[in-house]
Image (tube, rainbow, N blue to C red):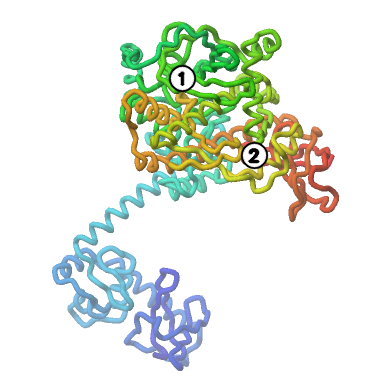
Amino acid sequence: MEGRIVEYIDAQKIITSICLEEKKGKVRLLNINNREIVLSKSRICLISKECLPLNQPREVLLEKLRAEIAKRESLAKEIDVLALWELLVSEGGTYTPRELAEFYFPETTSSAQESAIFRALFADRLHFKLRGNVFEVQSQERVEEILTQRTKEAEKKRKVEEAASWFKAVWQGEKVESPAQAEEYIKVIKEWCFWRDEAPQAKLAREILEKAGLNTEDQPFLLLVKLGVFSKHENILLHRFHIPTQFSDEVKAAARILINSPPFFSEKRRDLQDVYTFTIDGPETKDYDDALSLKKDGQYYLVGIHITDLSPFITQGSPLDEEAKERGTTIYLPDQKITMLPEGISEHLASLKKGGPKPSLSFLVTLNKQADIIRYEIVPGIIKIDRHFIYDEVNNLLTEDETFNILYQLALKFREKRLKQGGLVIALPELVFSFSADQVVDIKQRNPEQPARVLVAEFMIMANYLAASFMYEKGIPALYRAQLPPRERIMNGTSQDLFVLYLQRKLLNRSVLDTKPGFHHILGLDKYTSITSPLRRYLDMIMQRQLIHYLQRGEPLYAETELSFLIPHFEEIIHRTGVVCSRRIKYWILTYLKQHVKEHIDAYVLEETTRGYRLLLPEYLIETELLGAKGKFQQGDKIRVRLDVVNPTKEILKVVLA
């Protein structure tokens, strides 16, 4: 091989060199750049017939090599690859470059012609495929596949360049005309914002953003804000979890029909319209789903816990039922409420509004003064709401209104029984956000332990407990909520210490759903289900439907297997709702705190970490990390920190010691 011109492939290029030495399976080559390189002999693709004397000066060898390369490249341009392929495609098979050269050049072939064939076919990469040192004739079908793929790749390249150019201009504030495929490009970037690498066209999105120079974490989002596609406070998680904020035309139409022609619901119901019945809710409430009543009966009290009955309105398998099932729950966010049912139903038709008769699932509970349950009935009823009260009204009326005072005392005693059975009341403050336009202007804490809120909460817990007990005793298939004991108890019953309450909450086990009852350790009850919020939770709706069906027809609607199949669905809803709510609350807290960077704030030390301390900012019930200062503080210490860096979009909150 010494003195011969050889060719090999490196980095998808044909390299032409002169062999200076062949030894032990390796060759030492001289390339056009006057560099010597050692290769395995197996990498050589072509070897010339002609041999150059190696005793010539190096410059003479290089000049002859350059001339040979130029000759081969010129010949390669004259090769009609398509014509060669058309002659061979019907036969197929594989051929060496020499065989192809002898076929193409019928006269005696030279090394240059052999190289020209090699170069032309290697560059074409369509009609022939290089396999080792031979070329395989591609079939008609394969050639068409490759052409289609090349067309797609060319189109993709065009899209990348067009989209990147447009996005870059928009980012720089230039006024440019949107391309014809603007909606497609926007969709690609939107999906990238939602799902990143899991987006359907993640690769295309990355290429567009990289070419546009907009590939930092927050630039795609801000680009869509500039385009008016997103608001600057867009809730990405709603898109990521496919949570709809609007109802489909089909669902809207079903709701209109139902509202315009409501069903008759008086059959097989107890008429309770003469009982004075009232609701207690927040001032903003429109979807009233529970009400209360109270009657004295000698030394006992007859408490009515009345839940709006959706079973006449939302039937199993209807479009409204399927929509409610898919949504699973009404989602309450600081800046938005996403209802499970159309508002015409949840706030009007099925809402326990003052006035006309309403269908109910009524718990008629006889209690003594110690709040012992003497007996109870659960009946499908017809009620009439006499008055709507708000929490503050009831709080102010407690000392002078006997009804509210009795209900509150009974609620406290029922709670006391739960706590004696191991229950806990972890009454952390609720955060209330105030907005001006799209800016959060204030965050206040609301005490959930206000008497009126405790009153309502305890009787709802009682109703859920009685529903669970009744269904268990009657053998009615149901879904029960249970909760294992906390991983550690650091309080008994309840506490007034916010730090203790927060720590205890972090030590809770999550509640679980099952078709068999289990002890709910946080509530302190041996059986529990969820039935008192049918307007807001699909689980409550189907439990109510199951109970009503049994009470009216003597048999359950759902079999146990049907309910068990729903458990993963409900668990997924609980998970996604928890994530969306907690992350959105955090976003708005950080948005507010961003306005107060460099200000000082109180913090509790939760625990020491490898990098410093985990802190709780009690005013906003949000955690952060303090770097450094190790060994200086203990759990529970109250310290002052300064807000240092806040980025709501990236969920960054950094503090330093004040």
Q: Is residue 418 above or below residue 436?
A: below
Is residue 164 among the parts visible in the rendering? no
**For the N terminus, which image quadrant?**
bottom left
Label 1 to label 2: alpha-carbon separation: 28 Å
Q: Which amino acid does label 1 sit on?
A: Ser
State the residue position of label 2: 422
Q: Which residue is at the front of the view, 317 or 379?
A: 379
**Secondary structure beneath label 2:** loop
* Residue 539: x %, y % from top left: 44, 32
* Residue 406: x %, y % from top left: 64, 15
Left or right: where 39 falls relative to 453: left
**For the C terminus, which image quadrant?**
top right
Total numbered circles = 2
* Mark 1 vs 2: CB contact within 8 A: no
Residue at position x 83%, y 40% in the image: 639
Q: Which residue is at the front of the view, 459 or 431?
A: 459
Left or right: where 325 falls relative to 230: left
Which class describes the residues within 10 Å of circle 2: few (<14), some (14-19), or many (20+)? some
Residue 395 occupies which quadrant of the picture?
Answer: top right
Residue at position x 35%, y 47% in the image: 155
Say which label, 1 or 2, has the lower sequence index. Answer: 1
Q: Which residue is at the front of the view, 412 or 191?
A: 412
Q: What residue type is labelled 2?
A: Gly
State the residue position of label 1: 362
Residue at position x 31%, y 74% in the image: 131
